[in-house]
Image (cartoon, grey):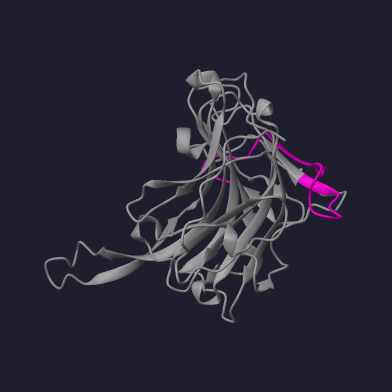
Amino acid sequence: MSCFLAAPAMAQSSASAFVPGRGTELTQVGDDFEDPSWEYIPNNPKSTEDINDQQNSPIGKSKNGRWFEGIKRGQPDVVERVDTPPGGLPGSRGALLLQSLYTGIPNRPSYQMHQEDFIGNVQYQLGGPIDISQAPSVTTRVYLPPIDQWEHRSGPHFAFRAALETNVPKFNPKRFFVSAKKRDEEGIYWPGLFIILESKHDSGKPHDYAYFRVRADSNGGDTKGPQITTTGWWTLGMSFSTDGLVHYYAKPGVEDLTEADYITSQMPYGYRCERFRAFFFNVVNGDDGRNWTTPWVVDDPKVFVTRGGRIASRR
């Protein structure tokens, strides 16, 4: 395992923070990749809407219905069930490799950083998003390969994120001068934990420096999280409390998260979370047609609720 410097001490947690992974697991969603016949059907070409407004259908989907391609940025070039890397969850025989060469338009390198989305199907599997009254959370295990296998580039390399909904008040311009009546409009936002590398190949320093970056604070800016002190397996999680806050957790290893693994609590963009609709992974590279993304392996993503409640109605 590759080592870095010591991590900073744990921050003081918010009063509403709770550890992701507690409560009742929703077995209709998430995945353990244990089925040897697990398969993903990419239905290429992938979508590149964020770059050239191109949506390609049908989108990529897993045979078990639990995963699908991100329509805005497309899916990783490689979505493949693999043997669980050493040190994984006890009894785990399968995990999922996510890796890309062309993160922009296939076979047309842009020489600019791009990312792709691999989305865990929650709202469609459940018949709607999860209402915040149920205090949902999501966890996953991520395998960080030895640092010499990472793309030699400074910047974001991977992310574990959530798709959340809030009610955004918006003025109706036709009524603005009459009654200034407001209506609620569904707003979607995407907080998460990013893995960042300051590469020695760019910096000229003797060592690489890797850390987590949290998206986002109330003003929409990113917050620097703990330094990554070792590669191998990590456990990541986010929980969503009934006051609308997002709580972020991470630890090395595959053991369940605890209070000691707390990073921070935020209300991203000043939005109060109302509903949880999906989780997803980003893979990122420089899209130069030569250097693949770091070979990320994920395992056992799970969704939980800690309170009784309801699935939110579709809007």
Judge by depth and name the residue closer to the eye, 17 or 172: 17
Bounds of the magenta segment: 70-95
In the rendered structure, the answer to whether residue 283 lies left or right of residue 145 reads left
In the rendered structure, the answer to whether residue 125 lies left or right of residue 205 reads right
* Number of numbered tags placed on the structure image: 0
The answer, for residue 122, to whether it is visible in the render is no
The answer, for residue 106, to whether it is visible in the render is yes
Q: Position of residue 56 (x, y in %)?
A: 58, 40
Task: Examine the rendered structure and indicate whether residue 91 appears above or below residue 222.
Answer: below
Q: Quadrant of the N terminus?
A: top right
Q: Quadrant of residue 46?
A: top right
Look at the magenta stretch and give its main secondary structure. Answer: loop
Judge by depth and name the residue closer to the eye, 105 or 96: 96
Q: Quadrant of residue 260?
A: bottom right
Q: Is residue 78 magenta?
A: yes
The residue lying at 47 percent from left, 62 percent from top is 246
Task: Examine the rendered structure and indicate whether residue 259 appears above or below residue 205.
Answer: below
Q: Is residue 265 magenta?
A: no
Q: Quadrant of residue 169?
A: bottom left
Q: Position of residue 295 (x, y in %)?
A: 69, 34
Q: Position of residue 273 (x, y in %)?
A: 44, 66
The residue lying at 65 percent from left, 65 percent from top is 21
